[in-house]
Amino acid sequence: MSSPKRRIETDVMKMLMSDYEVTLEFYVRFKGPEETPFTGGLWKIHVELPDQYPYKSPSIGFVNRIFHPNIDELSGSVCLDVINQTWSPMYDMVNIFEVFLPQLLRYPNPTDPLNGEAAALMMRDTKSYEAKVKEYVAKYATKENVDDAGNDTDDSDEMSSVGSLDDDEDDEPVGTMDEV
């Protein structure tokens, strides 16, 4: 008897080889790299593989919030050259989660920000930046938040929510992956 994982792989492969139009979309649980302010954090990463994958890069987005100069806090979009501009078919999904994202979290580039507040704070006061990262990790990057991330509304295509950091206000959806 085969394992459920093998069955999933087989069924997906059959669908891909059929005449059906298939969009491969899934989520990955990603842990913050050790010896960084992101240590101990857990994020839900939305991955969408285009039809032209591996010749075209996947769409990657953080579902639960993260404070980082190169990651948009509201949409979860990632600014990473290797994914957005210099992608090669030689790379695979494991590279993204074992090399590219950990390196991005270890070595942010505040001169090319998606989150201006994080970039400015990092350049102005590194200790305050690291404290705010740790605050976000404690507040948003927990197992409970990952389990709940993306389940706030009926539309599962939403990357993250718009809203203030206050718990009093309801979060509103930003948009779908197609807008990224």
Image (cartoon, rainbow, N blue to C red):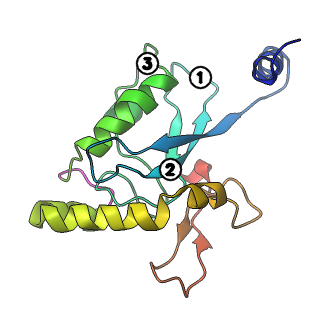
What element does badge 1 sit on?
Answer: loop
At 28% from the left and 54% from the top, the residue drawn is: 37
What element does badge 3 sit on?
Answer: loop
Tally of numbered tags = 3
Instruction: Mark 1: give few (<14), some (14-19) or many (20+) Cα within 10 Å.
Output: few
- Badge 1 is on which residue? 52
Q: CA distance from mark 2 to mark 1?
A: 26 Å
Are the residues tagged 2 and 1 within 8 Å (C-beta)?
A: no
Amino acid carrying label 3: it is Tyr
Residue 63 locus on image (x, y percent) = 55, 54
Q: Nearer the viewer, mark 2 or mark 3?
A: 2
At 49% from the left and 29% from the top, the residue drawn is: 57
Residue 8 locus on image (x, y percent) = 79, 23
Amino acid carrying label 2: it is Trp
Residue 137 locus on image (x, y percent) = 40, 60
- Please report the bounds of the magenta region as a residue range: 111-115
Q: Nearer the viewer, residue 172 or 35?
A: 35
Q: CA distance from mark 1 to mark 3?
A: 14 Å
At 82% from the left and 19% from the top, the residue drawn is: 7
Instruction: Mark 3: give few (<14), some (14-19) or many (20+) Cα within 10 Å.
Output: some
The residue sitting at the left extreme is 124
Q: CA distance from mark 2 to mark 3?
A: 22 Å
The residue sitting at the bottom extreme is 168
Are the residues tagged 1 and 3 within 8 Å (C-beta)?
A: no
**Mark 1 or mark 3, which has the lower sequence index?**
1
- Badge 2 is on which residue? 43
Amino acid carrying label 1: it is Gln
Are the residues tagged 2 and 3 within 8 Å (C-beta)?
A: no
- Badge 3 is on which residue? 91
